[in-house]
Amino acid sequence: MLSRMVYSTLVLVSLIFTQFMPNPAYSQSQQILITKDSDYFGFDLETLKDVSLDQCKATCLGNPACQAFTYNTSAQFCFLKSDFSKLKPFAGAVAGLKITLGNEPDMGAPPKLTYIPSYLQNEAKQFRLGLKSGKPVPETTGYLTMIGHGNRSLINNDTKKAIGGYYTALRIDPDSVSAWLQLASTSLIHPTTKSKDKRFYRRIATSSAYNAYLLARSRSKRAEALALLARGLEARTIYRPALIAFKQSLALRENPVERAAYAELLRTRGFRVLKHTVNSDNLSPRICVQFSEKLKSKKTDYASYLTLDQKTPQAIDVQNKQICIEGLSHGKSYQIGLREGLPSSIGENLLTNVNLKIYIRDRKPSARFTGGNFVLPLSARRGIPIVTVNAKSADLKLYRIGERALSSLIGRSKFLRQLESYQINYLMNSLGEPVWNGKVEIKPDLNREVTTSIPINEALPNRKPGVYLLTGEASQEGKGNRDDIASQW
């Protein structure tokens, strides 16, 4: 975090000197932006009489202290300004604003950032509209004055005052790319411990960077806006858009600091292995590796990027964000390797080799009855088959549901089908009457299903009319899964 704070401070200092000091690396041209029937009030530097509009423009361009002017067309007076505030309507006047152009070509309107969530775009829009709210900026408050206030506050490590200065400058000139960039940078490094404040300033950072991007017409400013947007998104844990913004920034302008930040974010939040799962309770177990992004189509030869005990796996299944290796065995350890370069559907590849050592345990003890339901006839009674896995015995309980409760059972669609545990608990507590419980011994075959017949006629030879619910729970060292069935005699 400290390195990022230092970087952001350097960005701000760079912005300050780029805007307000000459750059020996290239010559900057200046021009005058004209607005008719308007006036820049106050900040008078010098008054020229009996001059043309062109002479007024040339004089302001030739005077480093002149930042704007108001020209009275009827009196032919030129009022040079050392600073400027909001434009005021004034019929017959012409307002001029000195703007500095770099040596970079105008790139035109920026492409839309389709990967930025709509709610973030709306935040930026509302933030810009909010510049017009509140008390009007006093006419005696100048844009350059507020920028200078922000810069001095930043040098003195008072980021809160700096933010206020840049924000007020934007209220005067909401089209200033540099002011938006400075506001974004300062909001990112503003120190605060409260979660609410962090969220507030991070929203300012992303909104300011996004607005700067919309206004930037040069390659360097647009790249800077995207880099600040990426850092703001990262701070808000919006990682995928942050990665894309970093990538777009670096495509416009290579920067070693941004490149390192992008690489680190890509390593920790880019396409990567998230976790693995083991389906050990299947008859044929498998291991599935989950990724952070969707994989390419099944036409991609993913087997060439995998190893199973240092060999190519014989059977894999690629679906959405996971790769499953099949045809494995219980009670064995496997070494799975995923090779660097394994591709995703978003154009990112696995950055490093991933090695996993995974043990597939034996199947958990379980019990179930065959089929969806089991109905016994009134005569020629026979046993009920129960299917178990890795269970030495099964605990059985038999409940009778009388005639009064039968309609409720049928109405709730719980009749003649396998039941979930919560449904069993309801039936046992509200409808069922316990009539018998016992245990059946089982000869388990490791990890294989074993079918055992329950001699229910011996357990309860004399039965009243009604519906009987039989529950079975596999028991081995006190653990197991329960499965259930309703039987009618």
Image (cartoon, helix red, strand yellow):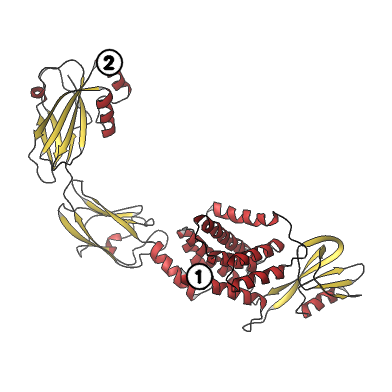
The vertical placement of 347 against 489, above or below, is below
Q: How far is the residue under mark 2 from the one under mark 1?
A: 74 Å
Query: Looking at the figure, which quarter contains the C terminus?
Result: top left
| Amino acid, disc 1 | Met
| Amino acid, disc 2 | Arg
The vertical placement of 440 against 285, above or below, is above
Whether residue 108 is visible here, answered yes or no, is no
Q: Is residue 38 left or right of residue 264?
A: right
Secondary element under disc 2, as helix, strand or loop, is: helix
Q: Mark 1, residues whose alpha carbon is within 10 Å: few (<14), some, or many (≥20)?
A: some
Q: Give the number of the disc on residue 76.
A: none
Q: Which residue is located at x 59 percent, y 75 percent?
A: 13
Q: Which residue is located at x 11 percent, y 25 percent?
A: 456
Residue 478 point in image, percent of width and height: 15, 41
Quadrant of the rendered image containing residue 72:
bottom right
Secondary element under disc 1, as helix, strand or loop, is: helix
The vertical placement of 191 against 60, above or below, is above
Whether residue 277 is visible here, answered yes or no, is yes
Residue 412 point in image, percent of width and height: 32, 24
Q: Which residue bears the numbered disc 2? A: 404
Q: Which residue bears the numbered disc 1? A: 5
Residue 432 point in image, percent of width and height: 23, 23
Residue lying furthest bottom: 24
Q: Is residue 174 left or right of residue 401?
A: right
Q: Which residue is located at x 61 percent, y 68 percent?
A: 182
Q: Earlier in the sequence, mark 2 or mark 1?
A: 1
